[in-house]
Image: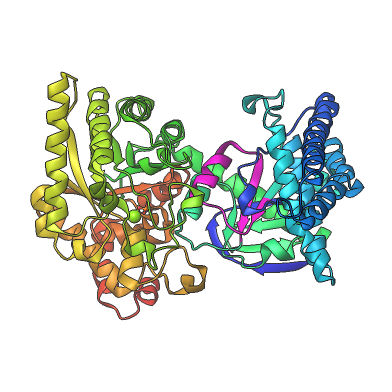
Amino acid sequence: MTFAIQGLNVSRGVAIGRAVLVASSRVDVAHYFVNADQVPAEIERVRRGRDAVVDEIRRLHETITHMGPNEAPHELGALLDVHLMLLQDDALAAGVKHWITDRLYNAEWALTTQLEIIARQFDEMEDEYLRERKADMEQIVERVLRAMKGTSSPIEAHNQRTMRKASQQDLLLDDTVDVPLILIAHDLSPADMIQFKQSVFAGFITDVGGKTSHTAIVARSMDIPAVVGARLANQLVRQDDWVIIDGDAGVVIVDPSPIILAEYGFKQRQGELERGRLQRLLHTPSVTMDGQKVELLANIEMPEDAAGALKAGAAGVGLFRSEFLFMGRQGRLPGEEEQYQAYRRAIEGMRGLPVTIRTVDVGADKPLDDSLHDDAHLNPALGLRAIRWSLADPAMFLTQLRAILRSAVHGDVHLLIPMLAHAREIRQTLAHLDHARAMLDNRGVAYGPVKLGAMIEVPAAALSLKLFLKHFDFLSIGTNDLIQYTLAIDRSDESVAHLYDPLHPAVLRLVADTIAVSRAQGKVVNVCGEMAGDVALTRLLLGLGLRSFSMHPAQILAVKQEILRADTSKLAPWAQRVLEADDPARAMTMA
Ligand code: PEP
Ligand code: MG
């Protein structure tokens, strides 16, 4: 039966495919397709993993039968029996075989997919004792996965089969192999999303998350349809259901009828045609009708994203979120040399264009590791994050500063500091920068000049611009956080997403003043939050005087189209009226 789930639209476009439900704790399991001739080897890998665990449990059983009741309680033996029974259960083996043979999933993916199905069956059981066996099932699959670790697949990630785009005909024929797959999870961390950058998935759906949560931001940078905050999607959708993601409307349609499928297939093709049309603007200079040059920069998460930025026609990188180099490493942070090489790759990837490297901005919804989710502090967004974290760990901060300074030998590097609010933080940051240079001097290591910028993303910063302009070469407005902190809305909490409003008069006032004051002092100012890539806001930002925008590469051409149609001499008075209005969103629709 067809039904729809409303979520938040985070990444445009339409994706149609089969649901792959992944438990949040298992998103790090490899997901790729094997070739048909590798099917027997994949099935064998699971069998060997399972047999190894069966042996392990039998040995344990043997040991405890020789122990007294004080050393090994009777229940332990019974529990091991249950584990053995579950391991040898036909439903597990048959299901795994099906996913590998019929869908060509790799062994680990097949195993976790089948686990999801069985876990749901346990959830639905009336009998409490049986319901509790779900945890046992999860434990044994975990053990099999661990046992399989030593027997990695002969297929390397770069060798994986890629999905071809399914045609409407395929979808209606219910082709079982080679149809796009849509990942559905309760939650995905930004680090998980990074893993999926090169993945087989054609779209993402999560139960939780706000529009400018970092998970949503990474989905947008991948330029594939995504919906977050879909609340119960993970429970309502079943493994392998057909789903449609309408990324523009933030809607998920489950089990669509052929008519709905055809309708969305049409919409999907329209979207592709529109993107094709925008490509014609790639080499058109970004200049308004009245001759104002506008700089269009890219936001990137990894050095390798530089290629996509260049391809999209970016004039440089306006925001390299360096924290993604620090995530998912179980606390083993990248050293100076590793960071230097990463920054250098990004700089060289941009072929002489400027690259703005932001110092590490972890904390809140960007934990270093998934296991380090900050539950200890009640308000992690107000806690030790971004520059506060860097200043609290001078050795780590100095390491990063040295790596960035060294990388500046290879190009035009701008160094950007996130989340500053206090004069003291500015002073400490500048002192650390001097110290980093002195350390490099002492070691006789070469480094280059950097332009120094501050992010304006805390209202306190936007209200003390004089201080910031005294110390920094440029300012970059982080509207995602500026909105969060001005309106007291957690950007990653879908339950308050309706209050997250870029057009709130207070937000616009802070953005407008930052632009105006910086320009009056001849300082460069840009917006690097999600507002910069929102075509509905391009004219307003131009009217407020903004001439530098930094966004996901995928948005650049659409924003450029708006710029080419704009006349800033007319937009400026209009923008002032919008700024003064009680309801700017309404005022924007008036001439
Ligand atoms: C912002 O806050 O607008 C910003 C660009 O930084 P981030 O989204 O990484 O917090
Ligand atoms: Mg920010």
Q: Position of residue 421 (x, y in %)?
A: 20, 59
Residue 462 coordinates in the image, percent (x, y): 20, 62
Q: Relative to residue 137, is residue 276 drawn left or right?
A: left
Identify the residue at image location x=80%, y=35%. Answer: 46
Q: Quadrant of ligand 2?
A: bottom left
| Residue plotted at (88% across, 44% down) | 88
Quadrant into which the N terminus falls: bottom right
Q: Nearer the viewer, residue 251 or 216?
A: 216
Q: Left or right of 383: which side holds 534?
A: right
Q: Quadrant of the C terminus?
A: bottom left
Give the magenta part as a residue range.
183-206
Q: Is residue 526 left or right of residue 439?
A: right
The question of residue 91 being in magenta is answered with no
Q: Is residue 49 left or right of residue 183?
A: right
Report which quarter residue 155 is drawn in: top right
Whether residue 319 appears in this view of the structure is yes
Where is residue 244 shown, x and y percent of the image? 70, 57
Q: Residue at x 62, y 59 (%)?
A: 186
Q: Please provide percent x and percent y for residue 383.
A: 32, 61
Asked if residue 190 lies in the magenta stretch, the reply is yes
| Depicted 507 relative to depicted 343: above or below | below
Residue located at (32% from left, 27% from top): 340
| Between 406 and 331, the one nearer to me in the picture | 331
